[in-house]
Amino acid sequence: MEHVTPPILTAVRELRWQLLSGKATKNAAQEYLTTHNDGFSRKIRELLLLREQNTLESRPKPFHNPYHVAFWDLLQRGLDGHPIVEPLSGLETEIERAAELDMEAHIATLPFKALLPLMFFQFPAFLLLLVVPLLRDLKL
C-alpha cells in the first residue's frame, strides 16, 4: 500500500514543512521538485519555468482540478512574497478530507466487486451441477 497519498497532498505537505523550517518559497519549491518526479511535479516544474520566462500569461489554464488550481495560486502568491503557510495548512486539511471521501467511496464498491467472480464463475458451475442431473433424468 505504498504511494497511496495523492501527489497534490505530498506537494502541499512538503512545501509547508519546508516553509516552516525557515526556507523561502522558491527554495522550498525547488527542494520539492528535486525530490519528486511524478506528473504533478513535472507540471509544476514546467509552470515555474514558464513563470520565470514571463510567458505564463499566454498559456491556457494549467489545471482543471480545483485543488491543483488552489495549490498553484498559493505557490504563485508565495513566490510573490506573501505568507502562505496558513492557507497551505487549510488546503492540506481539505485535500485530506477529499482523499478520505474518495477512499470511502472506493471501499463502498469493494463488496460488489468481490461478488463478481462468484457471479461469473461459481454460480454457473453450481447451476450446471443442478441442471445436468435434471436433464439426465428427463432423457430416461
Image (spheres, rainbow, N blue to C red):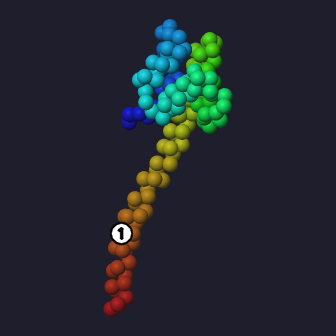
Residue at the (57%, 21%) spot, across then down: 52
Q: Is residue 40 above or below residue 30?
A: below
Q: Is residue 44 visible?
A: no
The answer to whether 108 appears left or right of 121 in the picture is right
Residue at the (58%, 23%) spot, across then down: 53
Q: Position of residue 118 (x, y in %)?
A: 40, 60
Q: How many marks?
A: 1
Label 1, secondary structure: give it: helix
Q: Position of residue 22 (x, y in %)?
A: 50, 8
Q: Quadrant of residue 37?
A: top left
Type of the residue with mark 1: Ala
Q: Quadrant of residue 55?
A: top right
| Along the line of sight, the residue nearer the viewer: 63 or 100 | 63
Return the residue at label 1.
125
Q: Position of residue 90 (x, y in %)?
A: 60, 21
> From the image, which quarter does the N terminus lie in?
top left
Residue at the (33%, 85%) spot, across then down: 136
Q: Position of residue 140 (x, y in %)?
A: 33, 91
Counting other residues with Cα less than 10 Å from the Cα at mark 1, is it few (<14), some (14-19), or many (20 or more)?
Answer: few
Q: Is residue 83 visible?
A: yes
Residue at the (50%, 10%) spot, across then down: 23
| Along the line of sight, the residue nearer the viewer: 128 or 20 | 20
Q: Is residue 45 above or below residue 120?
A: above
The answer to whether 66 appears left or right of 10 in the picture is right
